[in-house]
């Protein structure tokens, strides 16, 4: 699939799509960037050559600054606001990132704010840099509120009280706090984040597509009532068990020494060796 955009460059390596944002001077999310991100997420969702998505920035200081205020000022406000019956296109894009059957990872090495943070918070995992990564939902300070899913995603990520602090404070939150609160999975030194995230993404890309997709779906089901989530978990587990790849992988695991003390002490590597052993048998 051809990935050609104005504000994004895309490369695919070992099943991982690395999408790099570049819209100088500070990666403001203008109309061009929104169109690119919307189209990219639509394209990559159905690309069978891509198993994992990593979003990153060419600017070491900004992931996405925020949504373009000039664009917001052009919105027609002459009509009385009314409850809509369909999701806004921005919400649809963010939900696509959250629900697509492949893992999505945001590598946030610098600042992210407003709609950029709402987009980033839709990813399955987020990683940051010590002393560099900052999140600012500045909307209330501008007289509005986070309208691109922030008031709904942040409480699910960090809890209601902390979400209130982020949203109502309109102030930057540092990387250490973001990691402590659960907005960021982990934080790294600037020269360490690429190695970890890129290798982690490539690791996931070696695992069965069906197992990864259904595991992601099941984790997202944690937002359902517990009993409903558990019933769905059983269904999805049974669906993975029924795949030929699962049956083959469990047998190979035993052949490679799974359930022995020596191999269980290095189970991380054994999980990778299963794929190699299957290729050798093919």
Image (cartoon, rainbow, N blue to C red):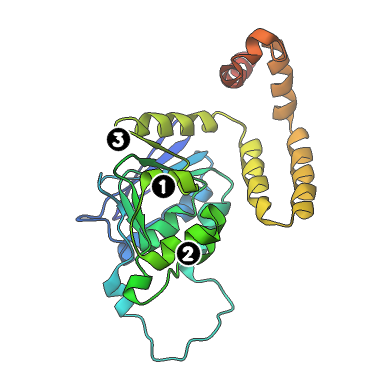
142 lies left or right of 95: left
For disc 1, the marked residue is 177
- Of helix, strand and loop, which one carries label 3? loop
Above or below, comparing residue 69 to residue 172 in the picture? below
The percent position of residue 268, horizontal first and vertical second, equals 57, 21
Mark 2 surroundings: few (<14), some (14-19) or many (≥20) residues within 10 A: some
Q: Earlier in the sequence, mark 2 or mark 1?
A: 2
- Of helix, strand and loop, which one carries label 2? helix
Q: Earlier in the sequence, mark 2 or mark 3?
A: 2
Q: Earlier in the sequence, mark 3 or mark 1?
A: 1
Q: Are marks 2 and 3 in contact (CB under 8 Å)?
A: no
- Of helix, strand and loop, which one carries label 1? helix
Residue at figure coordinates x 61%, y 15% from the top left: 277
Residue at figure coordinates x 53%, y 43% from the top left: 103
- Which quarter of the image is occupied by the C terminus? top right
For disc 2, the marked residue is 164
The percent position of residue 163, horizontal first and vertical second, equals 48, 60
124 lies left or right of 139: right
Q: Which mark is residue 190?
A: 3
Marks 3 and 1, how far apart in space?
17 Å
**For residue 132, what is the image quadrant?**
top left
The percent position of residue 8, horizontal first and vertical second, equals 32, 50
Marks 2 and 1, how far apart in space?
15 Å
Residue at figure coordinates x 33%, y 51% from the top left: 134
């Amino acid at each position: 699939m051809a990935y050609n955009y104005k504000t994004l460059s895309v490369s695919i390596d070992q099943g991982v799509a690395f999408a790099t944002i570049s819209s100088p001077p500070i990666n403001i999310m203008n109309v061009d960037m929104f169109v690119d991100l919307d189209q990219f997420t639509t394209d990559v969702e159905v690309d069978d050559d891509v198993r994992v998505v990593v979003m990153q920035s060419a600017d070491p200081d900004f992931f996405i600054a925020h949504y373009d205020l000039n664009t917001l000022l052009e919105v027609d406000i002459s009509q009385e606001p009314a409850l809509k019956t369909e999701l806004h296109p921005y919400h649809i894009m963010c939900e696509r990132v959250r629900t697509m059957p492949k893992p999505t990872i945001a590598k946030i090495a610098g600042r992210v704010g407003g709609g950029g943070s709402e987009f980033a918070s839709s990813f399955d995992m987020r990683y940051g840099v010590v002393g560099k990564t900052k999140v600012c939902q500045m909307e209330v300070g501008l007289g509005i509120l986070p309208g691109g899913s922030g008031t709904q995603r942040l409480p699910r990520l960090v809890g209601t009280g902390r979400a209130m602090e982020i949203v109502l404070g309109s102030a930057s939150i540092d990387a250490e706090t973001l990691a402590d609160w659960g907005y960021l999975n982990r934080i790294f030194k600037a020269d360490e984040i690429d190695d970890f995230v890129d290798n982690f993404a490539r690791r996931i890309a070696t695992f069965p597509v069906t197992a990864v997709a259904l595991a992601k779906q099941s984790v997202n089901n944690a937002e359902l009532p517990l009993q409903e989530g558990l019933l769905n978990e059983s269904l999805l587990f049974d669906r993975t068990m029924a795949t030929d790849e699962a049956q083959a992988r469990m047998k190979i695991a035993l052949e490679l020494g799974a359930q022995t003390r020596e191999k269980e002490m290095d189970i991380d590597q054994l999980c990778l060796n299963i794929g190699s052993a299957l290729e050798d048998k093919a």
